[in-house]
Structures are given as C-alpha cells and as structure tokens.
Amino acid sequence: MSSGTINILPDSKRRGKTYKPMSDINVTPLVDVMLVLLVVFMITAPLLTVGVPIELPKTQANQMSGDSEPLIISITKKNEIYIQKTEISIEDLVDKLQAIAGIGYKERIYIKGDKNIDYEIVMKVMGRISSAGYSSIGLITDLEE
C-alpha cells in the first residue's frame, strides 16, 4: 500500500466489466403521452358531434349497425326539418333527397325527431323519403335508463 492509490475492486473484476448500451426500450414516456392523448380525445369527442338540438324519445331498442356514415334528417319541436345541419322545407325534401341519390348515395336514412312532435309530421317526412327512392329508413332514439 505504499503506492498511494486505493483499489476498491480487484483487478479481475475491473478488467472484465465493459459498459454496453441498454437494449430495452423505456416505455414510461410513451405511456405518459398516450394517457394525455386519451384524456384530450375523451374531452373533445363529445364536442365534435354538434347538430340540431333535439330531445329524443327513449326506447329499449338495440343499436343498428352500419359501415358508412348515415344521412340524418332531424325534426325539431317547431317542426323544422334539417338534412344533416341544413334546414329545408318539407316541400323541397324530395328534390334534395333525389339530388343526393343522384350523386350516388343510396344508403340508410335516419330520422331524428324530437319527442314532443306530432306523429303526423314524422309520417309525412317518412313518406317523402320513401317517394324519393329510399327504402331503408331508421328512427333514432335514446336508451331507456
């Protein structure tokens, strides 16, 4: 011990130890980012479905399945009729639907009617949809609790 240096590890252990890069991926930052994105999408998703404000009737019917986005016709309390978000009169409904069918849309049409409207207006709209050439018509409701 007269050399003045202190060796903590024996020479055999010091020579064989080489540092290699870590080959494992640290996923903790990835998980943090994914959780933040999940929270952001959970908050913004309900805000993206903006449409005509309607109180839907409640039923116990099962949800209909479909691959493409349906064409939605909404009827408000004041008997105003909308195709998607565009207001339209009942007299112009057939012409607009035939124009939509002319561009290749022959899918299902959903009717979203307020729970306080008359049954007569729903039947008039369904009759106009049928006379425009659409045969697959569905009614949108909320689930009963």
Image (cartoon, rainbow, N blue to C red):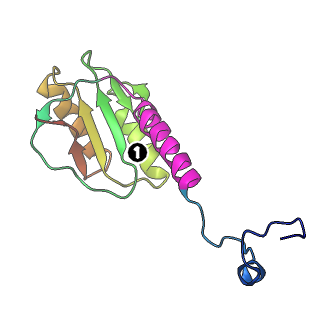
Give the quadrant of residue 110. Answer: top left
2 in relation to 57, above or below:
below
Instruction: Tell me which residue sits at (12%, 27%) in the image.
Output: 119
Q: Residue 104 location, x and y as percent? A: 46, 55
Q: Residue furthest right?
A: 3
Q: Residue 47 location, x and y as percent? A: 44, 30
Q: Main secondary structure of the magenta part?
A: helix
The magenta segment is: 28-53
Instruction: Tell me which residue sits at (23%, 24%) in the image.
Output: 55
Looking at the rendered image, the quarter that the N terminus falls into is: bottom right
52 in relation to 110, above or below:
above
Looking at the picture, tell me which residue is in the foreground, 111 or 46: 46
Q: Secondary structure at mark 1?
A: helix
Image position of 34 (left or right of 121): right
37 in relation to 113, above or below:
below
Q: Residues within 10 Å of mark 1 (few under 14, many from 20)?
A: some
Q: Residue 48 location, x and y as percent? A: 45, 34
Image position of 122 (left or right of 107): left
Looking at the picture, tell me which residue is in the foreground, 65 or 84: 65
Looking at the picture, tell me which residue is in the foreground, 26 or 21: 21
Q: Residue 112 location, x and y as percent? A: 26, 34
- Callout 1, which amino acid? Gln
The reply to whether the magenta stretch includes residue 59 is no
Image position of 21 (left or right of 89): right
**Which residue is tagged 1?**
98
How many circles with numbers are drawn on the protein? 1
Image position of 21 (left or right of 29): right
Instruction: Tell me which residue sits at (78%, 70%) in the image.
Output: 7
